[in-house]
Image: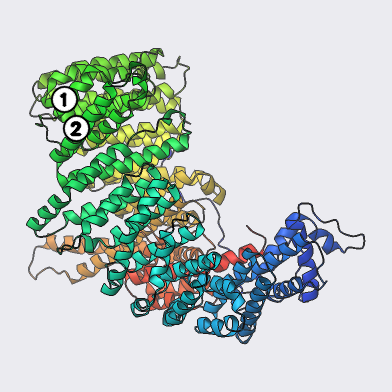
Amino acid sequence: AKTGLATPTFIFHHDKPEEMNVTPPQHPHIPPHSDNPDDEIKRVRIAISAVFSPTPPIPPPDATEIERLLSQRVPADAYLTSFQRHPIAWIVCDRLLIVDATGAGACGGNATETASRQFFAAQTLMFKCREDTFIRQIPSGALPSLRDSLVTQASNYFLRGGNRPLVTRLCMAIAALAVQMNWTTAIPDILETVYGPSPMLVPMVLELFSVLPEECCSERLFVSKTSMKAEMLDAMSKCSESMVSFLTHTFGKDDRVGRLEVMRCMCSWFRFVDIPVSVLTKSIMLEMPFGIVAENSGDDLFDVAVDCICEMLCTYGTGPRANSILIGRLVPAVMALGADPFKQAKEMQDQDLLRGYCRIFSEMGENYMDLIMSKEDLEQNKLVELVLHCTEIPDMEIATLTLNFWYSFTSALESQTPFDFRQRRIEYYTPLLTRLLQVCTVLLRYPTDILSLPPDAFDDVVRDRFYVTETIQDLCHLLGGDIVLTCLAGRLQEEYALFENTPDNEKEESWQGCESCLLAINSVSKYIPNDESTYLPGIMSLLSHRTLPQDSHLLRNTISMTIGSFGPWLGLHPNYLETLMNYIAEGLAISECASAAAIAVRELCEGCYKQQMGDPVLNLYDNIVKSNLNDTSNFQTDQKDENEVLEGVCKAVSSQFEFNPRMASTCFERLAQPIGNRLAKLVAPESTGSSKGVVAEIERLTVIVRFLNLPSVDPAQPGDALIFELMKQSWSLLDATAFKYPEDPNLAEKLCRLHKHALRKVGADLYAPLLEPLMIQIVRNFDISYQSPYLYLASICITEYGRKLEYVPKLFVMVSQLSTSCFSLLKSIEDFTNHPDVVEEFFYLVGRFMYYCPEPLVLSPLLLSLIQCASVGMHIQHKDANKGTLNFLEHTLTYGIDIVSSCREASLQSVPEGGDKDEADAVLKAKQHLLLCQQSLQTAILAEGQNIVSNIGRALIGELPAYTLDNRSGSITGIIWKLNVLCPELLLNWLAQPLEWAPDSPVKTEFINCLRERRGRDELTLATKAFNKYYERMRSLVTASRGGR
């Protein structure tokens, strides 16, 4: 292994990033944009034809070189992308829309090409209106003219029968521009100047009023001041009365298409705008969507009306905005839907209608939970029963929409006070909740075609069943295990009776009912006491007699899981164990059932710790291993399943040691010796096999180390001494595996995992004799293979021994040697990029050293080399590796803050006159040592601080990756904040250069003020995030303008 310290040999220059500009630079592979709108219109027309036409246009013989280039799809696409960000696009798109709308011949082409140009122009204007960066490309005085032009074009295209997507894009552009220019009178202005003179423009006006609140709240709308969105929403709120009057008047017309637009607009306003309650209470608008839903049309109008009702219920629930008048109108309206309309929908069995009603009732239940829990009798049970009727709908997708309500309902019941009232409430709703339990067993049924479903549909069924079992557990938590088990056992009896009465030739296909009940019972096992004697004996007897079909692997899996989950109960009722254990063992021989059976074995061994299960499961495990090694078909377990069984074996025999501790050595030898023998053969020089077998043996050893709890035969000797001896005896074999397969990352990971668990199981003190050989192995193996797990194992050594002063020098030697190896690997930015796992683990390693025992590193020249290396690591596009570098840097700065505090405290410490000379010398020596550490760290920070801060600045403006802005253990904000504590003036000086590359803005000013005023960490975090978000967006615009995608 290499020894000594090393300095990184790579060279990395911190280049100054290009300054961001509102007008983006030209892409080098496309023609320059013309400042003449007529010339640019011609080029854009050619490029649009090349991009959107099925066949590229053929340029005429007299075409210029630019026209020929733009007739090719790839350059044309890059040209249009760049064009969208250029100032000339404002004029060109406006003219394209005018020309194509009037048909004045300038552009030519067929109808398809005309539609493509129109849509591209509208899309471009919408895109530019959403960006405050592009808004600044035109004078502020020209914004009203642009707004009027967009409104005129939207009106003209609608009147001429223009396609809906085009009109929508223009309305979205108008809405975005309204926020950008603070057009707070948009609602009355549109009603007066557009709708008033031309009532036939109602659909276009409704579209504009629909998208206005949506755009105002959109994350894709970027404004110069965050308050602009709130101001616009407040202005819309003040215009609510005019808006409600307009919608009510428009809805009164007998036009379903018009009503659809009204409902969409209402839905948008309810969702985003704070409509005053006083406006709603004197309007009939609340009742409008209920009338539509009651018609049960099942069309788009029905769906939008449902959306509208759900938004009303969500916005005006019983929370802070509760209003008794609104509630008095909404609740009866919803309950009226639950009468005849809902019954008709159930009779029609229309899934779309039922889904709509289910959404309404569930939404009301969730948002009116306070009303349901009221101590006043308001017939709340009727609403709960409506939701239960929805849960009973035999469509899993619809029924599961109610599960969130049931979670909220049971949680609310459980939180009621005082206790007597809570119990009365639970008793009041118990009949409904027991019905819900019965419904859940129906929902848990596998569909009859389950075996023919595609994998994604099968996964959906499994997911939905999991959600239903969570509901059953919530009910069990509320009602108690006895009530729930009584209900579920009764359902199992019913389903089993149906199964018994099924003709013999159909029994193999009629197991779903019993299986669903068993799954429900399995889900509540932890709520059932181990002395339950009413229902579980019958259930276990049913499973023992095997009267249910044996060929369904889905049923067998559920039975196995049920047996395993009731392991503690079976431990007290061992008369069922042998039969059920045999059933599970049979499942290990079926490929589809092996995983469930292996887990059941483990759970039985955990639960039946008082039973003598050691020998039976040991024999079972031996047979599994023999089958896998001999590649026979006796068992179908993979390595994961085998390890589950082995974990169970370890727990079973460990529980027997309590009664017979002297059998520990025998059991331990029986488990470990075969592994050692097989491992010796596999790593022998003459062995030519792959590493797969070696990995399997190491995994088996790891399971034994983790889960075999050995007693102490000799009080003077800890029980885990046997594990220590196992590691000693296996040392040469484990060492040989790393030599034999140095390039296998899986083996390295498993080997290091074994050492980690052995160290933690044995304990640092007992394991100490093996520490030095382990560190030698780590250094040598990493130097040979550059496998990152060895760095992780080195981190574990630091965690376990870093606080013990006698081991710190050896740990520092290990870190120094690993640093030398890493520096020899990471010589360039390409090396960092190609080995992100090494970068990540290496910096977590040295970061951990700085946390546990930093002084040897701080006093060594190695620290500066590590900071230089971390500076390069900040450049790579890999989240975990980048976070590792930040982790090390932040731990280093944390030590700096601590050492400054320690030096300050030491300076105040003095020895009384006439005191002990040795004591005085010790105090002086301690002060000198602290000052030396402080000076060493200060030297390293001064040497590399500018580069680190420059990288941080570049990350904040998007030039370098900024994956971790805020994290308590390694983040950009953490480094900035701690540098601002240590050296605030230097930090601002270092930041000056990278911040010059960012144009002035409010977020930049706020960020700098946070630093100058030395505000708290939370305020700095918010300012840093806002700064990064703003400038990353600006950079993305510049990048895209160069043809990037």
- Can you identify the residue that label 1 sits on? 538
Residue 73 placement, left or right of 302: right
Q: Position of residue 368 (x, y in %)?
A: 27, 63
- Tell me the amino acid under the disc marked 2: Ala
Q: Nearer the viewer, residue 762 or 539?
A: 539
The residue carrying pointer 1 sits among few (fewer than 14), some (14 to 19) or many (20 or more) residues within 10 Å by Cα, namely few
Q: Residue at x 23, y 19 (%)?
A: 581
**Considering only vertical position in the picture, is 839 above or below 683?**
below
Residue 104 placement, left or right of 202: right
Give the position of the C terminus as an image quadrant.
bottom right
Residue 844 placement, left or right of 644: right
Task: Quote the CA–CA distance across marks 1 and 2.
Answer: 9 Å
- Can you identify the residue that label 2 sits on? 489
Q: Position of residue 89 (x, y in %)?
A: 69, 72
Q: Count the labels in the image.
A: 2
Residue 211 in sight from this viewpoint: yes
The answer to whether the residue labelled 1 contacts the one labelled 2, judged by CB atoms less than 8 Å apart, is: yes
**Considering only vertical position in the picture, is 129 above or below 58?**
below
Task: Identify the element where label 2 is drawn.
Answer: helix
Q: Residue at x 70, y 60 (%)?
A: 78
Q: Residue at x 21, y 19 (%)?
A: 544
Q: Nearer the viewer, residue 81 or 734?
A: 81
Task: Identify the element where label 1 is drawn.
Answer: helix
Q: Position of residue 37 (x, y in %)?
A: 77, 76
Q: Nearer the viewer, residue 761 or 224?
A: 224
